[in-house]
Image: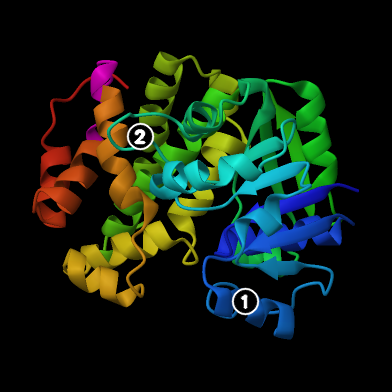
Amino acid sequence: MVEAAVMGAGAWGTALAKVLADAGNAVTIWARRPELAEEINRTHRNPGYLDVVLPESIRATSDPADALTGACTVLLAVPSQTLRANLTDWTGHISADATLVSLAKGIELGTLMRMSQVIVAVTGADAARVAVVTGPNLASEIAEEQPAATVIACSDSGRAVAVQRALSTGYFRPYTNSDVIGAEVGGACKNVIALASGMAAGSGLGENTAAAIITRGLAEIMRLGIALGAKPATLAGLAGIGDLVATCMSPHSRNRSFGERLGRGGTMQAALAATGGHVAEGVTSCESVLALASSYDVEMPLTEAVHRVCHRGLSVHEAVALLLGRTTKPE
């Protein structure tokens, strides 16, 4: 059993808090809003994000010091672009040898850092203390205890195994991997490709298009990952193609659903309103991923098209025409 703090009470943080509790660990979940923490403690539900019955052993708090004190495993479940600011506030309360587990999938705007790099930069922790959880993990299905697999990536094999054991249940199967770069690149980029997949579906395009987007999207992800030092095998596994397929195809995927609204002719403002003001991670990530790719001279045409739709006013119809009009070449 481990003492675990889950910092963030969104759908993914809540789902993994449930997994940790089901695996027999002591779990405290931090919620930004005191009223949400109180509701979780009182009703054992988090209906605004993930409406399932939570184990009674899960304790919620809105005080980060309360959540972090004594925790040997800290799961960071806040959005990628807010991780730095939150960690700056939390670092003084994190135990000196705690394992820091990133659940966020993205590249930081401006610095173009992966999330593990942000964690190291802010906390001063050795990179070997940082692990990444990634894979085809739709929170709602995991909360319903549907069978799922995930990847625990960490350069320290002992810590990877410890997190693996803490998250192992009859319905959730973690695999370890030492390739943190590959795990993070796959997780960040797949959200962008899922937006493209949703745009295509929303505009009435079919399965041939979907298959082409996923396949060519994977090619983009692999080009960037390999340029950064990732292992091709990582991106051919759960952290790459597995996560990509789930996010591109599932109606539960926020990124795909956001893209669908744009594909049906909706504006960014309308898509935001339909999701309660929650921005899909890919909308921000397409900007930082594209900048990172450019710095390594990596070509990512799908990512560029998504960026132009989300940030430059290009219509989905124009984006499709742009992609189809590219110079033909060998695969």
Outermost bottom residue: 43
Q: Are circles 2 and 1 on residues that touch, CB within 8 Å? A: no
Residue 286 place in picture, x, y as percent:
29, 42
Whether residue 35 is situated above or below residue 2 in the rendered picture: below
- In this rendered view, identify the residue nearer to me: 85 or 128: 85
- In this rendered view, identify the residue nearer to me: 31 or 53: 31
> Is residue 191 in the magenta section?
no
Q: Can you see residue 199?
A: yes
Which stretch is magenta? 294-301
- Taking the spot 55% from the left edge, 64% from the top edge, the residue there is 10
* Image quadrant in which the C terminus is located: top left
Report helix, strand or loop for mark 2.
helix
Using the rendered view, name the quadrant where residue 153 is placed: top right
- Taking the spot 51% from the left edge, 47% from the top edge, the residue there is 89
Report helix, strand or loop for mark 1.
loop
Find disc 1 in the rendering and name its residue: 46
Q: Which mark is residue 216?
A: 2
Using the rendered view, name the quadrant where residue 84 is placed: top left
Q: Which mark is residue 150?
A: none
**Label 1 neighbourhood size at 10 Å, few (<14), some (14-19), many (20+)?**
many
**Label 2 neighbourhood size at 10 Å, few (<14), some (14-19), many (20+)?**
some
- Amino acid type, label 1: Asn
Q: Could you give the CA–CA distance between mark 2 and mark 1, rounded to whole angstroms?
A: 37 Å
